[in-house]
Image (tube, rainbow, N blue to C red):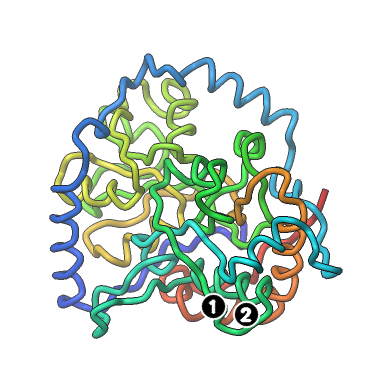
Amino acid sequence: MNARRLRTSLRGWGGVGAMAVVCALAAVFALLLPVTQSREDGGTDADGQGVTQGSQAKAEKCPAPQNQSLSPDSGPQDGKTIQRIKKNGFLTVGVDQNSYRFGYRDPNSTSKKAQLEGFDIDLVHAIADGILGEKDAEVHFQAIPTSERIPAIQRGDVDMVVRTMTINCDRLELVAFSSPYFETGQQVLAPKKSTVTGYNDSLANKRICSASGSIARDKLKADLGSVIPKSADIRTVVPNQLDCLVRLQLGEVDAVVTDGALAASQAAQDPTVELKGEPFTDEYYGVAMKKGATDLIRRVNQILVDYRKADWQKSYNTWLAGTLGKSDGPPPVQYK
């Protein structure tokens, strides 16, 4: 097993009090989930087989997507994107507010306005400070669902997205990415008492949840009938990945497929669930930006060069070591 892969031994989240809050939030989220987004036709999606075949063809022409970013640049910051951000005086970033330990609001916070915090949020602040040239630079956070990450960038709603977003070939057609800042892999999350053992035949006749626009969703459609049994029901699709945990807690699905890092964090929130089997992909998170924003991409990559030297490990120890165990450090980096 790859040494960087996620460890399946998990630690708790702070006892019964914290779990009571989580359960209360789960009930609220469940009431808010749009019914019309809960199911998709598993076999006749408009973006079904044709897209799957197209994705496979693209993947063959796009080896190592995590190595496709531009080289860093610490020179004059006179590009139009950087200048616009500096003129505004703040950085606008799309993030998640429901991914425990990556980007979330702590329900145990004593503040009435709990601040966003987590591994991704630390990185956002480092990028903002590096671009605007001041400590504690102003950041405008926009909480966006999984399915809106790319549209938000393309519309110009945000300068970038830092939201556990995997770099892959299809996405590189639509947005640009920084060099990778975290390594993970897809994994199965299910109740501890479940007969599910991983991404395999044990998913036969099981209801599986994934988020719209996610790698997990694409993988499930591509593998149905080959890697996983055709009887697996993959029709439950939600706008936000955390919604899958809610569905699992309510008994509406039998398993969740998502990034192993997120699955581990969710297992830390709910001690009745656990990761099943090993990660079955190798993936890398990157900072997503608009295609053509060359100055911004190079500047972010330069900030990441410095961030990896010490701040990355400090942030990991603060937020992720408790659920993922000891780290081997940030992923290796290559550029175009």
Residue in the picture at 26% in, 56% down: 273
Q: Is residue 72 above or below residue 254?
A: below
Q: Position of residue 207 (x, y in %)?
A: 26, 33
Q: How many marks?
A: 2
**Which quarter of the figure has residue 137?**
bottom right
Q: Position of residue 305 (x, y in %)?
A: 75, 70
Label 1 close to label 2 by CB (< 8 Å): yes
Amino acid at dot 2:
Asp
Task: Judge left or right: residue 103 versus residue 191.
Answer: right
Residue in the picture at 54% in, 21% down: 51
Task: Judge left or right: residue 164 versus residue 273.
Answer: right
Q: Quadrant of the N terminus?
A: bottom right
Instruction: Please name the residue that numbered disc 2 is placed on.
Output: 311
Q: Nearer the viewer, residue 140 or 312?
A: 140
Q: Position of residue 169 (x, y in %)?
A: 65, 36
Q: Position of residue 132 (x, y in %)?
A: 65, 74
Task: Judge left or right: residue 60 versus residue 23.
Answer: right
**Which quarter of the figure has residue 196?**
top left
In the rendered image, the residue lying farthest to the right is: 75
Q: CA distance from mark 1 to mark 2?
A: 6 Å
Task: Judge left or right: residue 171 versus residue 188.
Answer: right
Residue in the picture at 68% in, 74% down: 130
Instruction: Please name the residue that numbered disc 1 is placed on.
Output: 315
**Which quarter of the figure has residue 52?**
top right
Amino acid at dot 1:
Ser
Residue in the picture at 73% in, 44% down: 292
